Amino acid sequence: MQLRPEHLEARLKKEPAYVWLIAGDEPFQQMECADRIRQWARQEQGFAERLVFSSDGGGVDWNGVYNEGRAMSLFGDRRIIEVRLGDKRPDKAASAILVELCAEISSDTLLLITCSRLDRRRDMKSKWVQAVDRAGALIEVWPVQTERLPGWIQTRLKSRGLSATADAVELLTQRSEGNLLACAQEIDKLALLCPEGEVTPAHVQQAVGNSSRFTPFDLADALAEGDASRCLRVLDTLVAEGVELPVILWALAREIRAMCAMAEGLDPGVRMPPQRLRTLQARARKLGLPTLQRAQSLAARADQAIKGMSRDNPRDLITALLLRLCRHPLPEIMEVGS
């Protein structure tokens, strides 16, 4: 059975599942799901022992996993066998072990597997993932996108007995975007500071630091959406965190080259998820080839400025580049060096 993280609680209240796979690249949600399953197993199902097999170091001891999965506990206690795969995947022999354990799992053993995001073609069609899906539950966790973050925050606030004004939610979103762990911690802090239960922007300003965490790819995502204010906020955060301008420019130039190719009816030359490809194609159509070519020129000049080949300010050029691609261009005379 495939579940979303928000459906976990309801699933735990139904018939117990003894095989779980939590997959994804969003560490906070993955950690919370695993913690909740362990808590449920210990407090509500009586599981006392826990054995952990990790891919770190020399890799998973699959013989150990098999032997422990088939053996009875020395003291007759119910136990959790946890397999942490990370980015690695079971080979043919290990896959066969998981398939067999899933098929023969007893109510005295709970198998909990965690791993990075599942590839739709390779992993989802693998025998071991299909065996988990048949025997228990598969939870895929995904990063909370910008447009969904306010809703996630509202739900989190409600779970802590809090409510918040729209302005407070917006401020909390801006200060914690890209960092769910910090956001959850700040909400827990607000629960202590706001015993009356109503969170205002003043409370957020007083209690919450700027915990936003971004990568250059987040900037590319904001660019694909044409969100000028978010682009500038992400750029400011990246620079403040010490991300080098050449890395930022590389990510932007990659997107511009792809959109230029699309605007000309050519292959973009980069591999990306279908949904992102469609978003970028739509953006390329809106901008048109002349705007994209102007953006390429700005990117080239920013590259020269970074390399010390001109007196232009590369940060100003990157800002002008972002605004032009978000259809809020500066007057050409203000685009440095025009």
Image (spheres, grey):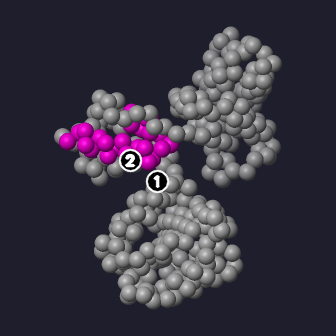
Check the image and name the residue furthest to the top: 333
Residue labelled with disc 1: 28
Residue 86 located left or right of residue 192: right
Taking the spot 68% from the left edge, 81% from the top edge, the residue there is: 93
Q: Are marks 2 and 1 in contact (CB under 8 Å)?
A: yes
Mark 2 residue element: helix
Residue 218 located left or right of residue 166: right
Q: Identify the mark nearer the N-term, 2 or 1.
A: 1
Query: Distance between the Cα atoms at labels 2 and 1?
Result: 9 Å
How many residues crowd mark 2 within 10 Å: few (<14), some (14–19), many (20+)?
A: some
Circle 2: residue type: Ala
Taking the spot 30% from the left edge, 72% from the top edge, the residue there is: 43
- Bounds of the magenta segment: 171-195
Above-or-below relation of 15 to 205: below
Is residue 312 among the parts visible in the rendering?
yes
Tell me which corner region of the image, top left, top right, bottom left or bottom right, holds residue 302. top right
Q: Position of residue 310 (x, y in %)?
A: 78, 16
Mark 1 residue element: helix
